Image (spheres, rainbow, N blue to C red):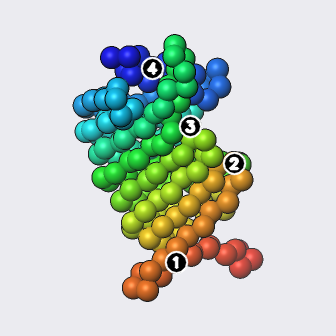
Amino acid sequence: MKLLIGLFITTTLLFSQTDKLIIDAKNFETNDATGLSIFTGDVKLKKNKDRLNSNKLEVYVKANSKGKAKQPLKYIATGNVSFELYSNEKHYTGKGDKIIFNPNTNEYTVIGNGYLKEITEDKELFGEKIFINQITGNARVSGTENKPVRFILNIDNGNK
């Protein structure tokens, strides 16, 4: 129960005073000893304009010190994962089999059947592993021998 209260306090204080992290799901379970909270069933995470949807979301937390709020270490979303992110004036949508988010570095990793669309500049990326850093706005994509990286850029050829 302490972890549950800590998790709710953390979601309010996680980012800045004006930011809120909201997680909705059909089921929730937590384990104080391991610091793991699991949300299952139509999971929807919201933070400002960012969104993450999945079948399952694991939130790993670590206690700072006695009496202080827990600090999230990692989020792992699996099962029918989709997302919408805003980073450095860019707007991304995407999906994948698994997404790992590290809140300390603001980095997302999409693993398996990854798709990323940069809405602002109308670019699309497909790959088996996609890395996004929300602070720098940088992205990296890896493919496999059977499924190489694909990049699609719509080019304005000036014909109107």
| Residue 87 image point, x, y percent | 65, 48
> Residue at point 34% right, 46% down?
54
**Residue 4: which quarter of the image?**
top left
- Helix, strand, or loop for circle 2? loop
Q: CA distance from mark 1 to mark 4?
A: 42 Å
Q: Residue 49, labelled with which disc?
A: 3
The residue type indicated by label 2 comes to Ile
Q: Nearer the viewer, residue 160 or 105?
A: 105
When the figure is inspected, residue 44 is found, relative to residue 118, above or below; the finding is: above
Instruction: Provide the residue designation for mark 4.
Output: 6
Question: Comparing marks 4 and 2, which lies closer to the viewer?
Answer: 4
Q: CA distance from mark 2 to mark 3?
A: 15 Å
- The 10 Å Cα crowd at callout 2, few under 14, some 14 to 19, many 20 or more, is few
> In the current view of this chain or complex, which residue is farthest to the right?
158
**Residue 146: which quarter of the image?**
bottom left
Instruction: Provide the residue designation for mark 2.
Output: 135
Earlier sequence position, callout 1 versus callout 2: 2
Q: CA distance from mark 1 to mark 3?
A: 27 Å
> In the current view of this chain or complex, which residue is farthest to the top?
67
| Residue 121 image point, x, y percent | 66, 62
Instruction: Provide the residue designation for mark 1.
Output: 150
Earlier sequence position, callout 3 versus callout 4: 4
Q: Residue 44, labelled with which disc?
A: none
The residue type indicated by label 4 comes to Gly
> Residue at point 45% right, 20% down?
6
When the figure is inspected, residue 145 is found, relative to residue 78, above or below; the finding is: below
Question: Comparing marks 3 and 4, which lies closer to the viewer?
Answer: 4
Q: In what quadrant of the picture does the N terminus appear?
A: top left
